[in-house]
Image (tube, grey):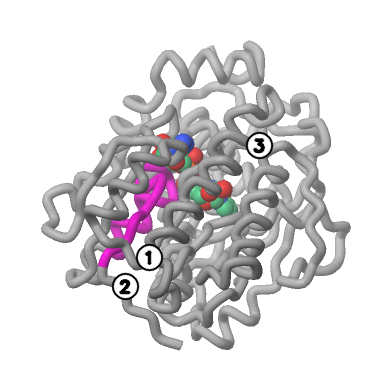
Amino acid sequence: MSFTPTSVLVTGGAGFIGSNYLLHVVPAHPDTQYVNLDALTYAGNLANLRAIEEADNYAFVHGDINEGALIDRLFEEHQFDAVVHFAAESHVDRSILDPTAFVTTNVHGTLVLLQAARKAWEGAKHACRFHHVSTDEVFGTLGMEGHFTADTPYAPRSPYAASKAAADHLVRAFGTTYDFPYVITNTSNNYGPYQFPEKLIPLVIRNAVVGDPIPVYGKGENVRDWLFVEDHCEALDSVLHQAGDQTTWLIGGDQEITNLELVERLLDEVDRATGKPVGTRRSLIQFVTDRPGHDFRYALDSSPVKEALKWTPKHDLSSGIARTVAWYLGNMDWLNDVLDGGYREYYAAQYGSRGMN
Ligand SMILES: NC(=O)c1ccc[n+]([C@@H]2O[C@H](COP(=O)([O-])OP(=O)(O)OC[C@H]3O[C@@H](n4cnc5c(N)ncnc54)[C@H](O)[C@@H]3O)[C@@H](O)[C@H]2O)c1
């Protein structure tokens, strides 16, 4: 199936994945208009989008996906035929401290968007498409073996994962109940440029550069599958344009590694890039009390998206880590700008004095 949108509402486009997505699609599809709706929470940063802010096919709107009247007005003004929905509260640790905003944005906000799209697309629905960007965490946790597939039953274990699962269910329920046109993608851990430095990889690089301790949960044995963000964005673009209606796609990097091994590889790469003997910075690692209900392992079977949509990630962990470390080292101003007072307070509440001076 081929779908070519003319006017796309992108929510959360000032966040980590959303900004990488816009940096990819805005120049790639000059005949498609993109409107980026973002509330600019602590995680939203318009500086990420400098390269496209003047583009003729790009506009930014500051607003909240929970504001139904605003969303209706944007649909009226821009005649969207696609929504690519990234906006979310996205950090598991924050959801453990307070789940409220996660339900408000991830569940209620998604419902507001679905309602607006359903109303606007009445009659023309099959020429339109709602793309919900979701996570592998909706499936719960794995042991040492096996992979999640699109048929794996949902078993979310954190408030963040539960809120994303609820949103996925709502999207599918709209599909069944109202014959609503959607696609869902569930993705593994992303990394790369413009990631907010509360997440593991930019946190490690930042602390490695300034010599702060590096907090690692438990014994660092949890296993994650890592996907370079640009590869993810290419997959998302393929799904929006090529996937069949009402389909779900799992997108992983096939790059599984324990958290401790990942941290060690990052520290070694920072050593290499800054001319220090490799291994010097490993002494910064400090093990901290494990996250409650910490999922042991996630892994996705991405073979359907590779076979049907001919997508392949261009980066393995080695090339992805090298590019990511080089990007953060070359953009320390970006990193320091992001590390404002609010971030530091949150960090102190999360890790105490162990990780931040
Ligand atoms: N980062 C990952 O590894 C990963 C993996 C799988 C899925 N996802 C999903 O991808 C999406 C994007 O993740 P991310 O890492 O870029 O998140 P992020 O936290 O970096 O960005 C979220 C963006 O949404 C905006 N936002 C938050 N609440 C809003 C609201 N009420 N109205 C409008 N905008 C709002 C924020 O300002 C921010 O720009 C999320 O839906 C997340 O669940 C992320």
**Residue density around tag 1, few if under 14, some if 14–19, many if 20 or more, within 10 Å:** many
Q: Magenta part of the protein: which range?
A: 7-25
Task: Give the number of the disc on residue 92.
Answer: 3
Q: Is residue 110 visible?
A: yes
Q: Tell whether circle 2 marks a residue whose Cβ is less than 8 angstroms from ligand 1.
A: no
**Marks 1 and 2, the one that precedes in the sequence:** 2
**Residue density around tag 2, few if under 14, some if 14–19, many if 20 or more, within 10 Å:** many
Measure the C-alpha gap from mark 2 to mark 3: 33 Å
* Residue 243, above or below 118: below
Residue 277 is covered by the magenta coloring: no
Dot in front, 2 or 3: 2
The residue type indicated by label 2 comes to Pro
**Marks 2 and 3, the one that precedes in the sequence:** 2
User: Does residue 326 appear to the left or right of 89 in the view shown?
Assistant: left
Q: Where is residue 83 drawn, in percent x and y?
A: 40, 60
Q: Nearer the viewer, residue 228 or 276?
A: 228
- The residue where tag 2 is placed is 5
The residue at 53%/78% (across/down) is 245
Q: Where is residue 253 drawn, in percent x and y?
A: 59, 66
Q: Where is residue 123 drawn, in percent x and y?
A: 41, 73
Q: Quadrant of residue 80?
A: bottom left
Q: Nearer the viewer, residue 46 or 74?
A: 74
Q: Quadrant of residue 257?
A: bottom right
Dot in front, 3 or 1: 1
Q: Quadrant of residue 201?
A: top right
Q: Tell whether circle 3 marks a residue whose Cβ is less than 8 angstroms from ligand 1.
A: no
Task: Give the number of the disc on residue 286.
Answer: none
- The residue where tag 1 is placed is 82
The residue at 46%/37% (across/down) is 66
Measure the C-alpha gap from mark 1 to mark 2: 6 Å
The residue at 59%/48% (across/down) is 265
